[in-house]
Image: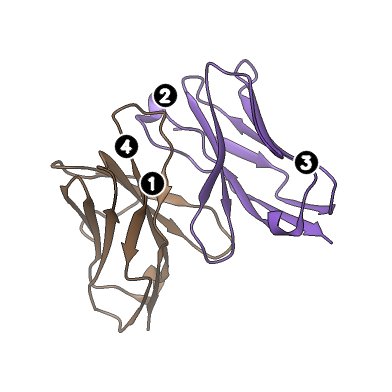
Amino acid sequence: GENVEQHPSTLSVQEGDSAVIKCTYSDSASNYFPWYKQELGKRPQLIIDIRSNVGEKKDQRIAVTLNKTAKHFSLHITETQPEDSAVYFCAPHGGTNAGKSTFGDGTTLTVKP
Amino acid sequence: GAVVSQHPSWVICKSGTSVKIECRSLDFQATTMFWYRQFPKQSLMLMATSNEGSKATYEQGVEKDKFLINHASLTLSTLTVTSAHPEDSSFYICSATTGTRSNQPQHFGDGTRLSIL
C-alpha cells in the first residue's frame, strides 16, 4: 500500500507569517493530491487539490505544489490568520491503491495572534 | 453542492448493543463511499470502501463481521457496529465521491461520535 509521511507534525507561526507543510508518498502511480483541513470535532474539508498533470495551483492565500519525480507535494499558506489554526491532512489518492486515499498523520497548525 | 449527511452525530449505548450509522449523499449520486475511523489526535484510518450494489472491500485488520456495511443505493450507505464494546468507541466518518474516475475529491459527513459504556 501507499506510505505517506507528513511533516512537520506541529507548526506554530505568528499571524501574518507563512506556513508550509510537506507530504511525501510512495506510490508513483498516485494521480490526485488533496489537502484537507479539520477543525476540532468537525469533518475534514477539502481546501485545495492538484492533479498529476499540474505542478502548482493557487487559490488566494493557499497554494499546493507537486513534484512527481520526487514524490512529494506541499501546502503553502501565506498571510496566516488565527482561523487557519487546525489540523491539516494530505491524502494522496489513486494509482495502485484502486481509487482510495491514504491519509497522512496530520499537521497541527497554530497561528498566534 | 456535494453535501453528505451522516446520522446520528452522537451515540452513547451499553456494551453489547449494535449501532447503525447512516451516510447519505443529498444532492449527488455517490458511486463510492468510504468509512473511516478516527481516534483522538490521530489521523483518519480507512476501514472499508463501499460501492453501490456490491460487497464492501475491507482494509486489512478490519473485521467484516463486526463492521457490517451496506450500500443499497447510490445515495445511501450504512455501517453497523455489531455487539459494540468499549474499544469500539471512536469517531466514525463517512465520505463519498462522484463519478468513476479515481482522482475525485471526497465529501465528508459530519461524523458520528460513538461511546460504548
Q: Amino acid at mark 2?
A: Gly
Is A109 or B18 nearer to us in this picture?
A: A109
Q: Amino acid at mark 3?
A: Thr
Q: Chain of mark 4?
A: B
Q: Are marks 2 and 3 in contact (CB under 8 Å)?
A: no
Q: Amino acid at mark 4?
A: Thr
Going 23% across and 58% down the picture, which residue do you hit?
Answer: B78
Local SS, label 3: loop
Label 1 vs label 2, nearer the camera = 1
Q: What residue does disc 1 label? A: B1
Q: What residue does disc 2 label? A: A95
Quarter of the figure with the C terminus of chain B: bottom left
Specify the colour of chain A: purple
Label 4 vs label 2, nearer the camera = 4
Residue B65 % position (x, y)? 20, 58
Residue B20 % position (x, y)? 24, 68
Q: Earlier in the sequence, mark 1 or mark 4?
A: 1
Q: Amino acid at mark 1?
A: Gly
Rendered brown, the chain in question is: B
Local SS, label 4: loop
* Residue A63 appears left or right of A43: right
Residue A15 % position (x, y)? 84, 54
Find residue B103 and report its image quarter. top left
Is B16 or B51 nearer to us in this picture?
A: B51
Local SS, label 1: loop
Q: Chain of mark 2?
A: A
* Residue B14 appears left or right of A29: left
Q: Are marks 1 and 4 in contact (CB under 8 Å)?
A: no
Residue B48 % position (x, y)? 31, 47
Q: What residue does disc 3 label? A: A78
